[in-house]
Amino acid sequence: MTPQPAIAGVLTAEQVDATGAAIAAMQEDSGALPWFPGGQTDPWDHVESAMALSVTGRIAEAEAAYAWSQRHQREDGSWPIRMIEGRVQDPNIDSNFCAYIAVGVWHHYLITGDTAFLDEMWPTVWSAMDLVMKFQRPDGAFRWGGDHRTGAMFDQAQITGNASIFQAIDCALRIADEMGQPESSWATAHAALGNVIRERPENFEPPSDHSMDWYYPILGGAVRGRAGQEHIARRWDEFVVGGLGIRCVDHRPWVTGAETCELALALDALGDTADAITLVESIQHLRDPDGSYWTGLVFSDGKRWPVEKSCWTSAAVVLAADAISRTSAGEGIFRDVRQTLVLGQEVT
């Protein structure tokens, strides 16, 4: 039996396993992992949910999810932004959504050691990253997306998506090295992106009132150490609500489980595991008896909103528990992102 993550006094291994089972129960016959049964599937949250399946030992279900990604990838390497039960709802391209396949594939390989899986998924990852590289601007930042029909790109660069792409390029480079096909152009793109995130944040769209714009530079791995700790401290009181989680939007009385657990992952990557545990504990009020998690809570009136148990919220809980407990072979996927690379190798 696969060892399950656990956090003493917060989540037992049996509870995490139940969360993995709840995610698997939401999976469609096609392998898609929608936000909730009958809801939309986007390529980023789909991969995050597949990662939680891998952690909890549901290897066949995770590989069915990656097979879905492989089948639905378009000839240009992209996926539609949004689908519902196989029907395209938004055909356009989000560069971060496309890049995230590399994180999921590398994570699954770390857990399984399955070289056949990596061989099978490598063309999908390569095609996705080849597309994503076309979205990089001269300043190193990546345009957030484009019109799939016309090929026009939207010039805005958003910090959350770029921070996630930073991690995805690192994972793609690891896969390329494992395949014996190092991609020096990806390493160059990774260096330019890291530089603009750390040194020229003003090149991105102004940070919004959403918490993701605050913690993603740390979660994605571009900012770490003392700079990361200071970055988190600056807006801590704006977002963190003691005992309840973190606000999704800084001025609204609404805490969300996924953002809280992602912040926990970022704190763990900074070495602040005690606060990471406190955050995961704080959102257990969102846990349903079946092991799934409600998306959020409007704490001013005590109502859950939106009224849905989202697949990706449950996935974020599993990934945070795994990182904190150091359980699976993929537990360091967020902590171990390399900040600086030369031709795919870490600079010492």
Image: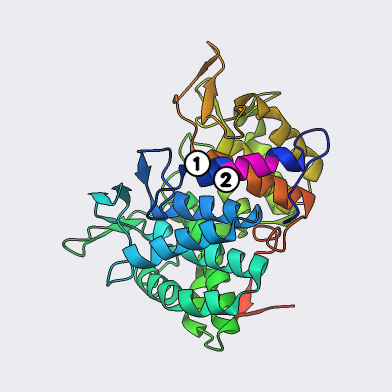
- In which quadrant of the rendered view does residue 71 lie? bottom left
Q: What residue is drawn where x is 32% and y is 52%?
A: 81
- Residue 104 horizontal/vertical position (percent): 54, 62
- Who is closer to the viewer here, 128 or 121? 121
Tell me which amino acid carries mark 1. Cys
Q: Is residue 271 left or right of residue 28?
A: right
Please check the rendered image and state whether residue 261 is part of the magenta-colored stretch, yes or no. Answer: no
Q: What residue is drawn where x is 62% and y is 27%?
A: 289
Mark 2 burial class by Cα count in 10 Å: few <14, some 14-19, many 20+:
many
- Residue 181 horizontal/vertical position (percent): 52, 88
- Location of the C terminus by quadrant is bottom right
Identify the main secondary structure in magenta: helix
Tell me which amino acid carries mark 2. Ala
- In which quadrant of the rendered view does residue 256 lie? top right
What residue is disc 1 on? Answer: 311
Q: Is residue 224 left or right of residue 146?
A: right
Task: Give above or below for 249 relative to 117.
Answer: above
What residue is disc 2 on? Answer: 315
Q: Are marks 2 and 1 in contact (CB under 8 Å)?
A: yes
- Who is closer to the viewer here, 2 or 145? 2
- Who is closer to the viewer here, 238 or 257? 257
Is residue 192 visible in the rendered image? The answer is: yes
Secondary element at tag 2? helix
- Residue 58 horizontal/vertical position (percent): 60, 55
- Who is closer to the viewer here, 338 or 208? 338
Q: Is residue 273 left or right of residue 67?
A: right
Outermost bottom residue: 180
Instruction: Give the magenta-colored segment's residue range.
Output: 16-21
